[in-house]
Image: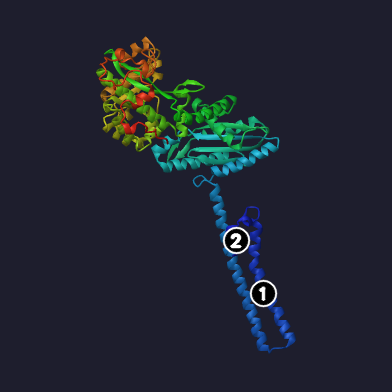
């Protein structure tokens, strides 16, 4: 019963009382033995004084008492060992519940407990508290190239360096993956928090010896500072430090301190997140189409389908205003399916109205969440059948970094390729892959050169050399090259000189709604074949149902 109570109520074995309990447990066998022998001696003396028994009986009684005392001592020893063993198990369980097994640092749950305590102390006193959110810059590259064991070893090294970079009173925790959080307590001012960030960066500058080779690791740090009158919640500080970390990573500044501008951005982000759910329910998204032209043949090559949000109070929002939030909140898959359905249905409508439209491709962007969805090829196949669009007219575009980050998704892309659908690498040249790496992407048929290279066309020989190299490689691999973001005649001429004939950009046309694409001008139209034929200028809802089977009319977009 004693051990059961200890297991159910480990309170006595907390760090405060454990030493006292250990001393009591160590003394208990001796106390039991001494008490037994003393009691036996008193009993024998009483019996002898009364002389009610013979000497033999007195000897037997004394021996029984001694054996009883020894037995009690042995039982006490067993009890002591059992309790200590139980207390050790409880201590280990308490430690494991609070610490990350890989690095030995506090885990996320324990971090928030410590953070809450530190925040309350900061509020009641006249001290400043800082929260630092760290994310390693090249961890995925090392993890993928050298293996997970090397990645784990790197995380342990990072944990050790973090602990050596801060004060003993500071809290260091592993937040998850390659993310860490440091809580700095009882500081004098904001400069003290910044000094901790600078100390960490300095400590990280020393190369790491990893499996016999020197590796340079770097980290981006976001800093959130709480003064005694701060009205934020403790968890808000972690959120704000995380937001500042993204700013530091984007600007490659090492660390960034959360400020008022970022506070407004966070509020705006929370508003966007809340409104996105309503936008999906109320069909507030619209699909715009940017023409892609073949300048040598002077004809329309295709369209890229681009999503816009007709926000009820903010007006028409471009993808930069909400797609990042949609990705992080798991809504990107539903938005991506919506765009895929409407774009395929609209292309099928144009096919019906103009025979020449059958040679025009429809490009639709694939989000990271869709690439990670094992059922995505089945969705593409279902949408093609649903819309009636020939699969060779559909091109799915994947951002270069998304492919590099998820090489396990290549087999899924091959499954999509087998459907007859074209695949393109979007924003090529801005990511982590090399030109030689493209040889592994045997399912890709199109490379889209990013606008950043086109912008400098004619102004710098370096970008021209990169574009020439891409074109040369593409020809060797039998790939088409499309240039994005063409806005001037100078860029047009430079791209043509490099051998690129397929382009898109504001020089040719901005993204437009389907209603603005008049088949009589954009395609050679054919007359309507009866009263039920689709008409140009359809609304998005009409487009999405133009060629749908009756049972598919009300099929909702899937949500992650």
Q: Position of residue 80 (x, y in %)?
A: 60, 65
Q: Residue at x 68, y 36 (%)?
A: 123
Q: Residues within 10 Å of mark 2 (few under 14, many from 20)?
A: few
Q: What whole-number distance in Å separates the C-alpha atoms at marks 2 and 1?
A: 26 Å
Q: Residue at x 26, y 30 (%)?
A: 420
Corner quadrant of residue 544: top left
User: Considering the image in quadrants, where does the N terminus appear?
Assistant: bottom right
Q: Nearer the viewer, residue 526 or 483?
A: 526
Mark 2 lies on a secondary structure that is helix
Corner quadrant of residue 525: top left
Mark 2 vs 1, N-terminal side: 2
Mark 1 lies on a secondary structure that is helix
Q: Is residue 539 left or right of residue 81?
A: left
Q: Does 427 appear above or below 235? A: above
Q: Does 170 appear above or below 484? A: below
User: Considering the image in quadrants, where does the C terminus appear?
Assistant: top left
Q: Residue at x 65, y 79 (%)?
A: 65
Q: How is the image coloured?
A: rainbow
Q: Is residue 203 left or right of residue 397?
A: right
Q: Which residue is most to the right?
A: 49
Image disc number at residue 36:
1
The reply to whether callout 2 and callout 1 are in contact (CB within 8 Å) is no
Q: Is residue 19 left or right of residue 539?
A: right
Q: Position of residue 488 (x, y in %)?
A: 38, 11
Image disc number at residue 5:
2
Q: Name the front one of labels 2 and 1.
A: 2
Q: Position of residue 160 (x, y in %)?
A: 53, 42
């Amino acid at each position: 019963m004693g051990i059961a109570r200890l297991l159910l109520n480990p309170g006595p074995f907390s760090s405060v009382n454990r030493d006292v309990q250990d001393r009591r447990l160590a003394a208990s066998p001796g106390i039991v033995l001494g008490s037994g022998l003393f009691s036996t001696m008193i009993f024998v003396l009483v019996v002898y004084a009364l002389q009610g028994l013979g000497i033999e009986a007195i000897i037997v009684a004394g021996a029984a008492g001694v054996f009883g005392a020894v037995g009690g001592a042995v039982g006490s020893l067993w009890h002591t060992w059992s309790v200590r063993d139980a207390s050790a198990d409880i201590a280990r369980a308490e430690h494991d519940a609070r610490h990350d097994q890989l690095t030995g640092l506090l885990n996320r749950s324990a971090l928030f407990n410590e953070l809450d305590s530190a925040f309350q102390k900061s509020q009641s006193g006249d001290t400043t508290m800082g929260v630092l959110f760290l994310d390693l810059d090249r961890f995925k590259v090392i993890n993928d190239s050298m293996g997970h064991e090397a990645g784990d070893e790197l995380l342990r090294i990072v944990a050790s360096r973090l602990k050596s970079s801060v004060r003993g009173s500071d809290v260091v925790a592993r937040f998850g993956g390659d993310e860490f959080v440091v809580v700095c307590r009882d500081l004098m001012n904001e400069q003290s928090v910044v000094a901790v960030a600078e100390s960490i960066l300095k400590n990280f500058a020393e190369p790491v010896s990893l499996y016999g080779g020197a590796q340079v690791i770097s980290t981006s740090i976001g800093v959130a500072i709480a003064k005694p009158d701060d009205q934020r919640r403790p968890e808000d500080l972690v959120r704000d430090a995380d937001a500042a970390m993204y700013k530091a990573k984007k600007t490659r500044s090492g660390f960034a301190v959360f400020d008022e501008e970022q506070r407004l951005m966070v509020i705006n982000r929370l508003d966007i997140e809340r409104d996105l759910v309503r936008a999906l329910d109320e069909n507030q998204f619209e699909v715009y189409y940017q023409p892609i032209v073949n300048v040598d043949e002077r004809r329309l090559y295709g369209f890229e389908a681009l999503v816009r949000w007709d926000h009820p109070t903010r007006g028409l929002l471009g993808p930069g205003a909400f797609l990042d939030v949609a990705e992080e909140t798991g809504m990107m898959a539903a938005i991506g399916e919506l765009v895929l359905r409407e774009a395929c249905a609209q292309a099928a409508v144009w096919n019906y109205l103009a025979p020449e439209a059958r040679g025009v491709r429809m490009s639709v962007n694939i989000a990271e969440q869709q690439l990670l969805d094992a059922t995505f090829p089945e969705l593409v196949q279902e949408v093609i059948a649903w819309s009636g669009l020939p699969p060779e007219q559909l091109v799915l575009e994947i951002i270069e970094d998304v492919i590099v980050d998820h090489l396990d998704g290549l087999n899924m892309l091959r499954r999509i390729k087998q459907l007859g659908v074209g695949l393109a690498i979007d924003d090529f040249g801005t990511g982590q892959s090399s030109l030689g790496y493209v040889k592994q992407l045997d399912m890709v048929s199109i490379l889209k050169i990013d606008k950043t290279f086109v912008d400098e066309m004619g102004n710098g020989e370096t970008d021209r050399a990169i574009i020439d190299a891409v074109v040369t490689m593409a020809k060797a691999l039998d790939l088409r090259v499309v240039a994005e973001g063409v806005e001037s005649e100078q860029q047009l001429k430079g791209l043509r000189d490099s051998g690129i004939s397929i382009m898109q950009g504001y020089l040719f046309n901005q993204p437009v709604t389907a209603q603005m694409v008049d088949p009589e001008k954009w395609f050679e139209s054919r007359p309507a074949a009866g009263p039920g034929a689709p008409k140009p200028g359809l609304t998005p809802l009409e487009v999405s149902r133009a060629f749908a089977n009756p049972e598919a009319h009300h099929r909702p977009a899937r949500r992650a």
